[in-house]
Amino acid sequence: MVNQDDSFIREVNEELRSERMRSIWRRFGRVLIGAAVLVVLGTIGKVGYEFWRERESSAAGDQFLSALTQIREGDREAGQKELAALEKEGFGAYPVLARIRSASLLAEGGDAPGAITAFTAIAKDGSVPQALRDAARLRAAYLLVDTGSYEEVAAEVEQLTNATNPMRHSAREVLGLSAYKAGDVARAKEWFEQVVNDGESPRNVANRAQMMLDLITASGKAS
């Protein structure tokens, strides 16, 4: 008798659970299906986007390398055309890299004013990553050592000379070179000493700064 009662109770409980599930399904079935569909579509979209992004990035990378190869092998015109196309239609960081390389080509071709303008435009472009903007500032500043004033060089890179900026070493060097060229030996010496006294200065930059300090001392113009 007990077994029959237990069996009856189980059947009732199962029926109740079944009815409860049917009730829940009637009320929320469409919502649950919709949510499941959204999850599936989201997954498909994410995978598809990642595939597209990887393919586009790979294609842009191949095009950038192709342009560099053509330039290196002497076909400058074809390389510049590929770089120009990347600037307009490239993917990821490659349009910016193409802009930087195009500006470098202007400098290599003797068009310092054009290169400075191009590098300055990159430095002022808020959509460009900060590290690349700072690098563009430095390139413009090095060109300005020969073609501009100390004030123009300082306007580009003095903001990079603080103790936490990873590009401070080169920024101090270029300011020292510009000051020395302008005849301001005392200021040049200050910048070169900052390079030499910074324990994190790259060896090649520190060595060049020390050479300039030695030159200043040998000239008898050191204060």
Image: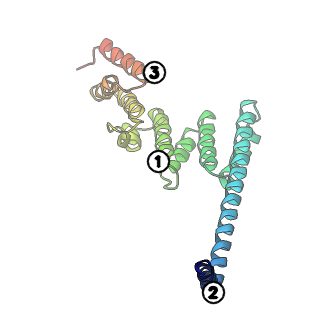
| 132 with respect to 10 (left or right) | left
Q: Earlier in the sequence, mark 3 or mark 1?
A: 1
**Vertical side of 191 occupied by 19: above or below:** below
Q: Which residue is mark 1?
A: 130
Q: Earlier in the sequence, mark 1 or mark 2?
A: 2
Q: Which residue is mark 2?
A: 19
The residue shown at (31%, 27%) is: 194
The residue shown at (64%, 68%) is: 39
Q: Position of residue 18 (x, y in %)?
A: 64, 82
Q: Are marks 2 and 3 in contact (CB under 8 Å)?
A: no
Label 1 crowd bin: few (<14), some (14–19), many (20+), radius 10 Å? few
**Vertical side of 220 occupied by 137: above or below:** below
Q: Position of residue 30 (x, y in %)?
A: 66, 83
Tell me which corner region of the image, top left, top right, bottom left or bottom right, holds residue 25.
bottom right
Secondary structure of residue under mark 3: helix
Cα distance between the residues tagged 2 and 3? 80 Å
Q: Position of residue 129 (x, y in %)?
A: 50, 49
Q: Which residue is mark 3?
A: 204
**Vertical side of 33 occupied by 52: above or below:** above
Q: Are marks 1 and 2 in contact (CB under 8 Å)?
A: no
Q: Amino acid at mark 3?
A: Asn
Label 3 crowd bin: few (<14), some (14–19), many (20+), radius 10 Å? few
The colour scheme applied to this rendered structure is rainbow
Q: Amino acid at mark 2?
A: Glu
Q: Position of residue 200 (x, y in %)?
A: 37, 27
Q: Amino acid at mark 1?
A: Gln
**Vertical side of 32 occupied by 183: above or below:** above
The residue shown at (65%, 61%) is: 46
